[in-house]
Amino acid sequence: MDTFMIDPKSLHTLEFSKVLSKLVPYTSFSGGVDLARGLTPTSYLDEAQMRQRETGEARAMIEAKVNVTLGGVYDVRDLATGAQRSVIIEPGDLLNIRSTMRRATTIKRTLGRMKQQYPLMADLAQQAEECIELQDSIGSAIEDSGEIKDSASARLAIIRRELQVAFDRLQTRLNRLLNVHAKSGFLQEQLITTRNGRYVIPIKADHKGKIPGIVHDSSSSGATLFIEPIETVELNNKWREMQLEEEKEIRRILLALTDLVGAVSDKIIRTVEVLAYIDLVMAKAHYADAIRATEPTLVPFGPKRGSSPK
């Protein structure tokens, strides 16, 4: 006996997509959204009853105010897949991975303690991975703002100290030049600015050459030239050199973290899939509560899943 399937035309006639569009707003992240939009009726009684029981447990959890929200979860599956090929993950995305795994940890442990009350939801949550070592590694290297911590590596801490020293020396020399020429009339303004990644000072165009240096830019009117004084070129070079060293070390740190993600990418992907399904179940429960839905009684119609034709 063939499985009873509802054909797309019938779903269109029933305006099933409109029902799903009402469910989608109750999801919390894109993984749940995708599952909600792709939801189809089942012709198997046991599967339909299982879905009902899951939704029933979720409704009971909502009523009991059990905290199983999916806030802070992101669909990081593409990032995890890319990490297998060492595609460097940027700091913000690494924080999203950490946030997702932290939320999985919380949900898994919360429901694990409540398995007797909510066995189906607890079993779902137990399929999630925690990847605690990865969570800790990301947290120890990246600030919540997305900045790489000085303590991310001993080398980065040294580079940043040297970078600060180079910057201070450069600024001190430039400020001394401004003070020396404050009353000369050469300066358009007594300020320090940057052009093309170099620190420069603005001089009047008709005083070009009065302060030896390299012209990096001019104002739109042409009245002002932005020059890098000769005596600060080496200091500028040192400062820029340390910036490049910092960037290089940060990329090395990010690559190391990316490799950690790649090593557990399958676990991350599986966890996102689990969280997406939990999101779908919770969305069903919230939607059911919103419309004050009553669980229908289902009766056999067609074969049980896996039954043989007679």
Image (spheres, helix red, strand yellow):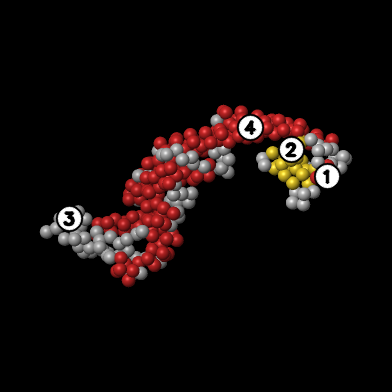
Instruction: Indicate which disc, 3 or 2, sits on the residue closer to the N terminus.
Output: 2
Amino acid type at circle 2 is Ile
* Mark 3: few/some/many CA within 10 Å (<14, 14-19, 20+): few
Between the C-alphas of marks 4 and 1, the distance is 35 Å
Residue at point 44%, 59% (across, down): 26
- Is residue 29 visible to us here? yes
**Residue denoted by label 1:** 206
- Give the Cα separation between the discs numbered 4 and 3: 70 Å
The Cα atoms of the two marked residues, 1 and 2, are separated by 15 Å
Q: Please, what is the three-letter code of the amino acid marked with disc 4? A: Met
Label 3 sits on what residue type?
Answer: Ser
Residue named by callout 4: 242
Residue 34 image-quadrant placement: bottom left
Question: Of all residues shown, which one is farthest toward the left?
Answer: 310
Please tell me whether mark 4 sits on a helix, a strand or a loop. Answer: helix
CB under 8 Å between callouts 2 and 4? no
Which numbered disc covers residue 214?
A: 2
**Earlier residue among tags 2 and 4:** 2
Q: Identify the residue at horizontal 29%, vertical 56% (top origin).
A: 50
In front: label 4 or label 1: 1
Mark closer to the chain start, 1 or 2: 1
Mark 4 touches mark 3? (CB < 8 Å): no
In space, the residues marked 3 and 2 are separated at their CA atoms by: 84 Å
